[in-house]
Image: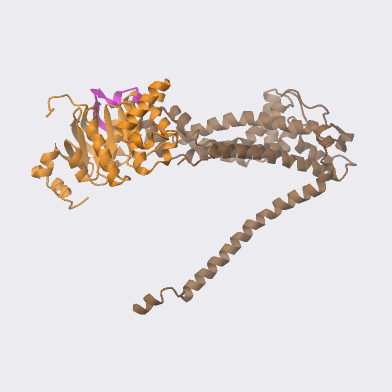
Amino acid sequence: MVTAAPALLEVRGLGIRYGDKVALQGVDLQVRPNEIFGLIGPANAGKTSFLRAINRMDEFVPNMRVEGEVRFAGHDVQHITNLYALRRRIGVVFPLPVGLPLSIYDNVALAPRLRGMRSRADLDAIVERCLRRAALWDEVKDRLQNLGSLLSGGQQQRLTIARALSQEPALLLLDEFSIAVDPVTTMRIEEVLKELRQELTIVLVTNLVQQARRLADRTAFFLGGRCVEIAETESLFSGGAKDQRTIDYLEGRFG
Amino acid sequence: MTRSAMDGFRATAHELRSLQAQRLMRLLFLMMALLLLVPVLGILGVLVVEGAPGMTWEFFSQKPSKLGAAGGIYPALVGTVWLTAVALMVALPLGVAAAVYLSEYARDNWLTRIINMAIVNLAGVPSIVHALFGVGAFVHFMNFGESILAASCTLAVMTLPVVIVSTREAMQAVPKAFREACWSMGATRWQTIWSIVLPNSVSGILTGLILVVSRAVGETAPIMFTGAVFLRLVPPESVFDRTMALSFHLYTVSTQVTGVPRHVPFAVALTLILVVLTMNALAIWFRMRLRGRKKW
């Protein structure tokens, strides 16, 4: 139990609109350091919008309006002027793997290079460490110069994770990472995530209820743009859910 | 039920009609595609047959005499290369920069819409109007005089829409997901453009370049009043010189000069086409080298 530790991510009264359409409203939650915070809910629950608000990707989405407060490591992200520094501390993994059309090596070395690292030795070290941590090193170590965008889906998703880790983020946002990944790879990535919890904090958006159960310390249930319930994952799944909608969703009656 | 399952592969009358229509349409489209070859082969054929006698080394390497009725086309050949190269040097940076802005930075607002409309309209302006604009803007207002610089700037303005549109299309073809991945790791827009978007749209930019070269080499009207001359026996030495050009030379030897041997205009035209083809081949070769492997 780490209830006493200050929250890494603190969300108060978060609302998100796209034009007139409300995607999220009145969300309050806290993510503690070194926990895996699960976020479950059916389509259109506002899960992805929630992630976008955290690393300020709203800047790139026309019409997206964010209300309320998101504090990351004590700073209100709406008032951070250096958004690039904010995004560097937050790694993102999208639903569909994005292997950039660069070599495998350059994919992982991109973020360090963008922040000015030039030393070949340092880059080599980072690339190897990140690929190892993403459980991809053994499969690609002999062909680091091949194109990352031509790897298989599961490998690309691990490459994406390695790339996110190369930013040395404090927070890792995963948006339904297993949607385009086979079950075996999914299990491998889940093992990776469990180990990563030692070093960083993870927000895991998933539409697989059992995945949240396997990985998350606490889980929030989103529905129709509202946060219905947040609880310790164990208690949520062992009959501790208070809201009837949560119970119905967990038992697979909808969504 | 059983019967229809057994007969399932025998075509019904309706299916037969559909198949017939399908074959007919395919034939029709094939004919149209083949029809396209006719003018291309026709033009090339006539030019080669009629112009071949004139295609000698002396023709390329000597200056014209008797107002172009005899001698070679060396100054015009060099002049065309100058005009095209300078036009490219002006149009390419301007056009690519504008395309980068429109594709990567511009929001959908009234300014962007006006710019887009301007590009479309610029592409529709007749070349003789561009020529007059060039006279006013470059020869007189900018005080370039009648020179390669003025002519090339006129050509550049004329070809800008092509550069902009083809570059923008090429950049738009790079998946949005790549940009988002880059942005989300803290890259600025420019870093994203430089490391991901531009390298993957080079082939499209080169396509634009091919089109620009082809047009710039062949245009006559825009250079007629801005820098091309009827006869100038020495090749240009700077961008402020006036120059002969193949396209203008073709016009004069076919209509303005008397006593020109029949093969000369054809040889000039053939040379003009060969210059275009050579430059296109270079760009295509370069593009294929860049594209060598599939990126995603």
In the image, the chain rendered in brown is B
Q: Is residue A130 above or below residue B266?
A: above
Give the percent coordinates (x, y) of residue A137: 35, 34
Specify whether B123 is left or right of A112: right
Which residue is drawn at the image coordinates 27% and 42% (left, top)?
A186
- Rendered location of residue B222, percent (x, y): 71, 35
| Residue B67 spot, x, y in % from top left | 87, 35
Q: Does residue B147 appear anywhere in the picture?
A: yes
Q: Is residue A185 magenta?
A: no
Relative to B125, does residue B244 appear above or below in the rendering?
A: above
- Is residue B134 at least partly visible in the picture? no
Classify residue B164 by image quadrant.
Answer: top right
Q: Colour of chain A?
A: orange
- Image quadrant containing the N terminus of chain B: bottom left
Region rendered in magenta: A63-84
Quarter the C terminus of chain B occupies:
top left
Q: Quadrant of residue B29?
A: bottom right
